[in-house]
Image (cartoon, rainbow, N blue to C red):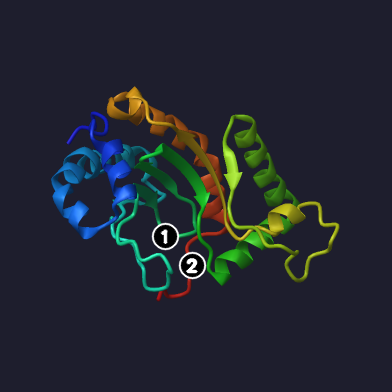
Amino acid sequence: MRFEGFGDGAVEFFDGLEADNSKAFWSDNLALYREHVRAPMEALIGELEPEFGPGFGTGKVFRPHRDVRFSHDKSPYKTHCGAVIEQGRGGGAYYVEVGAAGMLVAGGCFHTESDQLARFRTAVDTEIHGEQLRRLLDALAAAGWEITGEVLKSRPRGFAADHPRLDLLRRRTLYACRRWEPDDALHERSCLDRVRRAWADVRELNQWCADHVGVSEKKRR
């Protein structure tokens, strides 16, 4: 299937889901979701995977149901549709999502197990790899990307208070993202080029994550 943009009803679907996150609403609007949201997202990932996937990872569209087992919020459905190209969580990811707020595109390290975090800190601690990461992040920030992720309140054990990259060492996750409010491009073929250009911007960051964080060696529960 060729990507031609998300359906005209995509944003309205998520507006409605935010207002009524229920099985009844979902069932009544399932056909709209499949046609205007899910199918276009699968087409988008299908077209971009040959460019960004080889040697890096595979593409998938995330399921719409939330995992509510350990959450106080028992809303059954995600209020966005997300997709990713990655080898495994934490080792770099090309991410895209669409929802009521429009589109978000991101790249980097979205999750770390203990072994991944140890490798991240080892790399940041070294001058060559740590400063390379700093330059990548500075360039993305200068180009309008938001640098975000989970940050520790205090410094990790074993590192001096005056470490030159302490701000990076305090991070548990680290990624860059860009957002676009709903616009005409979201529903057009040009949306693919928007995601392609954005993913090209985070290619080096993703490669850094793949090289220095990688996929966890711990078994996922």
Residue, x 60% and y 57% (percent of image)?
150
Furthest residue in direction right, as rendered: 162
For the C terminus, which image quadrant?
bottom left
Q: Amino acid at mark 2?
A: Ser
For the N terminus, which image quadrant?
top left
In the drawing, what numbered circle is on residue 150? none
Q: What is the x, y in percent for residue 191?
A: 34, 29
Furthest residue in direction front, as rendered: 19
Residue 75 occupies which quadrant of the picture?
bottom left
**Label 1 Cα neighbours within 10 Å, binned few <14 / some 14-19 / many ≥20:** some
Residue 99 occupies which quadrant of the picture?
top left
Left or right: 74 in relation to 133: left
Q: Which residue is mark 1?
A: 88
Q: Amino acid at mark 1?
A: Gly
Residue, x 84% and y 61% (percent of image)?
161
Mark 2 secondary-structure assignment = loop
Residue, x 18% and y 45% (percent of image)?
34
Mark 1 secondary-structure assignment = loop
Q: Are marks 1 and 2 in contact (CB under 8 Å)?
A: yes
Q: Nearer the viewer, residue 192 or 179?
A: 179
Q: What is the x, y in percent for residue 132?
A: 67, 44
Q: Which residue is mark 2?
A: 216
Q: What is the x, y in percent for residue 162?
A: 86, 57
**Label 2 Cα neighbours within 10 Å, binned few <14 / some 14-19 / many ≥20:** some
Residue 160 occupies which quadrant of the picture?
bottom right
